[in-house]
Image: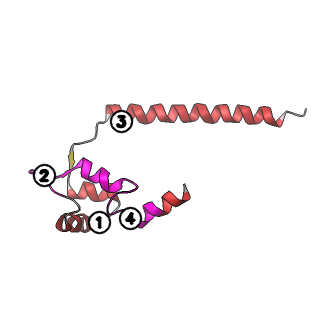
Amino acid sequence: MIRNPRRLTDVSERIDDRELRIAFLAVRLYAETHPRPAQVTQQQAAEMLGVTRRTVHNYIRSGRLKLNSCGHLPIEAIDAIRAPNGYGMRPVFSTLRILS
């Protein structure tokens, strides 16, 4: 039996769309049930940024990051560095941006 290749593609696309919607809903559910902290330690920031704790310390000394009154880093400061156009962007992020 010969099948219509376009029809198979349509089914495949519907499955991909369905899987994408499920993944999106799973991520949204996770984000809603696991709120992000307002502040993080230097070690947590290093893990989020993919750098060493010493590099985070250097960012603080240079003024790229600022500690709050509790000695922690506000999550917004980490997000700003992680942003594609963020100050202190690592080369790996540039490479990924070019590939996408």
Point 39% across, 31% down: residue: 29
Q: Spatial distance from mark 1 to mark 2, Cα to Cα?
A: 20 Å
Q: Which residue is mark 4?
A: 90
Quadrant of the snapshot with the C terminus: bottom right
Q: CA distance from mark 3 to mark 1?
A: 26 Å
Quarter of the image with the N terminus is: top right
Q: Amino acid at mark 3?
A: Ala
Callout 4 secondary element: loop
In the image, is residue 77 part of the stretch drawn in magenta?
A: yes
Mark 4 or 3: in front is 4
Q: Can residue 72 be found in the magenta stretch?
A: yes
Amino acid at pointer 2? Asn
Furthest residue in direction right, as rendered:
1
Task: Say what secondary structure mark 1 lies in.
Answer: loop
Location of mark 2 (residue): 68
The spot of residue 4 in percent (x, y) is 84, 33
